[in-house]
């Protein structure tokens, strides 16, 4: 990867500082926030440990809510279980962090970012395998873009999502190049964790991922991935014709209803979805605006709003520049196509379902990182060709 120990150490330190800033911001601004609530739940578990340590350890390691009854993760009726499974994983990891940190909330940031950082390094190594000359551009996107640095370094699932994608990418590449049972085992475990972190995101990922793996050596692998996403879109839109009980659009509608009930701090007046193709089509412009345009810069707004608006403009500018310099030859690489279409599919889902600005800014961060890296990979910006090597 050709990053010195000094650079790697500096990048990790920067991520930890961003994580501390994220935690300080949320604890200062909001009476209730996900990070601190998770920490308090972890402390409750830990405080009860001395009463029944054996029962506690048995629960921590083996009680996952009847996982054997919900192994069919494609069944929409299991969606709620897998959503709760992700929360359970997150809580138990916090318990472990509280043990290691002796209950110090800010020290937990270090343990979270060890995983986040290793995942982002794995993602970087995968990208450099295909486009080594863009090392510093990829480093800048993954570690220094404000939104990605802030949200993917805090005690949230977003850092886990980006890390899991990176680790899966690197392990898959190693398996495809040179099969190894240890890498295969690690890959299966990471894919399972990816399923647990965010159920719906995994469903958007796994079909095209399998197409990339199966047709990796085929010159038309990119076409197979596009075919998978095309077929997936048709199945999603017309699943109700197969059976009313198989209406996949209802999953999106239910998710939006859950967000409406949570009542966030910054309502975007998101249109109410219905489980119909017409409703999805009518709501698409608003979904795209919320993902790629919001927050719109406004004078006199709070500093946090201005920072988010600057980040939104910066990401949009980078995407537009990459679009101007697309190169057809790079579209033959299946991994690049996977990054672009996987991230877009999830970003659309977020735009449809999340009705408040703060949540959208957070949820979209890891997928904007994947999308930007994908767009950079399929483009050649003339000015950057003359950037001297560092």
Image (spheres, helix red, strand yellow):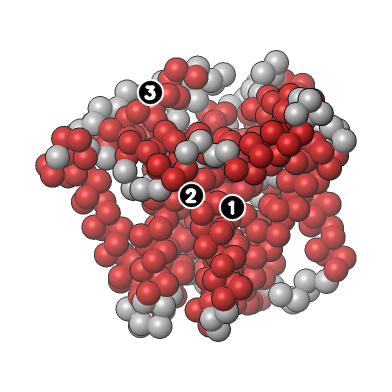
Quadrant of the image containing the C terminus: bottom right
Residue ID at (80%, 46%): 110
* Helix, strand or loop at mark 1: helix
| Quadrant of residue 273 within the rendered picture | top left
Q: CA distance from mark 1 to mark 3?
A: 26 Å
- Where is residue 146 drawn, in percent x and y? 68, 45
- Where is residue 31 drawn, in percent x and y? 70, 15
| Quadrant of residue 92 within the rendered picture | top right
Residue ID at (26%, 58%): 230
- Where is residue 79 drawn, in percent x and y? 39, 38
Q: CA distance from mark 1 to mark 2?
A: 13 Å
Quadrant of the image containing the N terminus: bottom right
Residue ID at (14%, 40%): 243
Q: Earlier in the sequence, mark 3 or mark 2?
A: 2
Where does label 2 land, which residue?
195
Q: Classify residue 173 as left or right of residue 248.
A: right
Q: Classify residue 187 as left or right of residue 235.
A: right
Q: Is residue 322 above or below residue 244?
A: below
- Other residues around mark 3 within 10 Å, as few (<14) / some (14–19) / many (≥20): some
Mark in the foreground, 3 or 2: 2
Where does label 3 land, which residue?
257
- Other residues around mark 2 within 10 Å, as few (<14) / some (14–19) / many (≥20): many
Q: Earlier in the sequence, mark 1 or mark 2?
A: 1
Report the front residue among 194 and 161. 194
Q: Which mark is residue 162?
A: 1
- Where is residue 152 drawn, in percent x and y? 65, 45
Residue ID at (45%, 17%): 261
Judge whether residue 9 can be spotted in this image. Answer: yes
- Other residues around mark 1 within 10 Å, as few (<14) / some (14–19) / many (≥20): many
Q: Are marks 1 and 3 in contact (CB under 8 Å)?
A: no
């Amino acid at each position: 990867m050709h990053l010195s120990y000094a650079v790697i150490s500096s990048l990790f330190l920067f991520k930890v500082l961003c994580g501390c800033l994220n935690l300080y911001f949320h604890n200062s601004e909001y009476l209730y926030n996900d990070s601190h609530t998770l920490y308090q739940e972890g402390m409750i578990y830990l405080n009860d440990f001395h009463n029944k340590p054996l029962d506690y350890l048995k629960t921590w390691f083996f009680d996952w809510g009847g996982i054997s009854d919900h192994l069919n993760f494609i069944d929409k009726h299991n969606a709620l279980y897998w959503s709760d499974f992700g929360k359970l994983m997150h809580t138990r990891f916090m318990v472990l962090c509280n043990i290691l940190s002796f209950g110090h909330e800010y020290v937990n940031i270090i343990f979270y970012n060890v995983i986040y950082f290793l995942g982002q390094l794995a993602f970087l190594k995968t990208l450099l395998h295909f486009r080594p000359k863009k090392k510093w551009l990829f480093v800048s996107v993954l570690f220094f873009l404000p939104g990605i640095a802030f949200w993917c370094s805090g005690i949230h699932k977003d850092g886990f999502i980006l890390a899991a994608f990176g680790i899966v990418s690197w392990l898959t590449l190693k398996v495809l190049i040179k099969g190894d049972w240890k890498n295969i085992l690690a890959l299966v475990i990471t894919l399972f964790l990816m399923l647990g972190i965010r159920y719906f995101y995994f469903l958007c990922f796994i079909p095209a991922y399998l197409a990339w793996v199966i047709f990796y050596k085929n010159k038309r692998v990119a076409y197979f991935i596009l075919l998978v996403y095309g077929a997936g879109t048709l199945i999603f839109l017309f699943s109700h014709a197969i059976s009313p009980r198989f209406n996949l659009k209802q999953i999106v509608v239910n998710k939006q209803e859950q967000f409406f009930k949570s009542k966030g701090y910054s309502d975007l007046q998101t249109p109410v979805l219905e489980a119909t193709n017409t409703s999805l089509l009518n709501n698409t412009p608003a979904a795209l605006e919320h993902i790629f345009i919001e927050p719109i810069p406004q004078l006199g707004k709070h500093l946090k709003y201005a920072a988010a608006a600057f980040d939104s403009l910066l990401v949009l500018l980078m995407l537009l520049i990459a679009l101007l310099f697309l190169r057809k030859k790079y579209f033959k690489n299946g991994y690049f196509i996977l990054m672009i279409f996987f991230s877009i599919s999830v970003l659309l889902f977020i735009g449809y379902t999340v009705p408040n600005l703060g949540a959208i800014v957070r949820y979209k961060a890891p997928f904007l990182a994947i999308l930007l890296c994908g767009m950079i990979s399929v483009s050649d910006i003339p000015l950057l060709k003359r950037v001297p090597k560092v």
